[in-house]
Image (cartoon, rainbow, N blue to C red):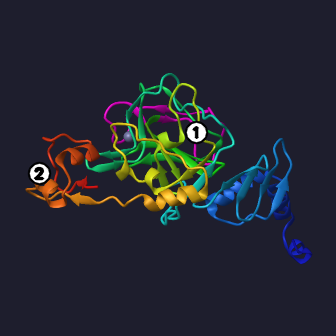
Amino acid sequence: MKLSFLLRTPIYKIIIILFLSSTTVFSQALDSINDNTHVESKVVKSDSLMKITKDTLLIKDSISIYPFEKWDNTRFNPYKNQLKEFPFQIKFSDSTYAAPISGKKVITSRYGWRRGRPHQGIDIDLVTGDHIMAMFDGVVRFARYSSGHGKTIVIRHFNGLETAYAHLSKYKVKANDTITKGQIIGVGGTTGNARGSHLHLVISYKGNYINPEYLFDFGKENKLRKQDIWITKHWTSAHFHTSKRQSNLVYYNSYEEALANHKKQSKRRVHIIRRGDTLSQISTKYHVSMMKLCKLNAISMNSILKIGKKLIIH
Ligand SMILES: [Zn+2]
């Protein structure tokens, strides 16, 4: 602050400026995210070391890095240009997660192709009124109504992963709140496009949805499958999975191994259903058995083919 500026400024403004600059660094950082202004590089010492730079990076416990990039409180998925580089790695500092619901986690629909559309999360059964808990420490990025998802909370965690909790009946937190693992964040329900009460849980990294069961074991011990995990296209694309059964889980120990497997993973071919199409015609056209088409698409021989929906061919 220049002296000449201070001399020209009325005394009450100086008092306000001094008061504002003494408020906590953390709230300044969050404000800056809201209004997109820059924050001077500052360091504050508290229980855990927090450092906030003008690029709005928060370093917590000096190990985890929380990227504030695409910090958008109004869009469910603000990543326009999704990360296209595969494989990518996600690291966790814990070996367990906190269960998003209390009691047994019954998965009623899995990540994958469902009724000609991608189901990019898993459905966990609950009763309206049940509490919803945050799976890890993080900051609420989004807490609002999202079409289809209903009342939804998205939390960005310190390793960059996002967990989203949809079809809620109530919010218990708001955007930009800092959250601890296991904290109650909302109440389950049926808002949005939900057939009956359940939690639709979505896991994503920089806008790429990931099959939640690839990362987490939904048994009672709340274990992570791996703390250091390589993700290939196969685990982000719903085309490779069906909502009816768990996919065969395959893990890679190094970048090279993941890359080699990523390259081997063929691209899915889909057929858009047109008027008059039948399963047997499609089977003949693409030289794929009707049995295989049924298995890939989780349909039966006499399922109705809806015009405009996609059928996975191979
Ligand atoms: Zn769902």
Compared to 116, does 79 lie above or below? below
Instruction: Tell me which secondary structure the magenta stretch mostly adopts.
Output: loop
Quarter assignment of residue 97: top right
Compared to 178, does 272 lie above or below? below
Q: Nearer the viewer, mark 1 or mark 2?
A: 2
Q: Magenta span has 91? A: no
Compared to 264, does 244 lie above or below? above
How many marks overall?
2
Looking at the picture, how far across and down is residue 264, in whole percent? 44, 59
Whether residue 206 appears in this view of the structure is: no
Quarter of the image with the N terminus is bottom right
Q: Residue furthest left?
A: 276
Q: Nearer the viewer, residue 68 or 30?
A: 68
Q: How would you rate the neighbour count of disc 1 (Cα within 10 Å): few for under 14, some for 14-19, many for 20 or more? A: some
Looking at the picture, how far across and down is residue 116, in whole percent? 26, 50
- Per the image, label 1 sits on a secondary structure element best described as loop
Q: Which residue is mark 2?
A: 280
- Judged from the image, the quadrant occupied by ligand 1 is top left
Looking at the picture, how far across and down is residue 44, in whole percent? 84, 52
Q: Which residue is mark 1?
A: 173
> Is 163 on the left or on the right of 181, as rendered?
left
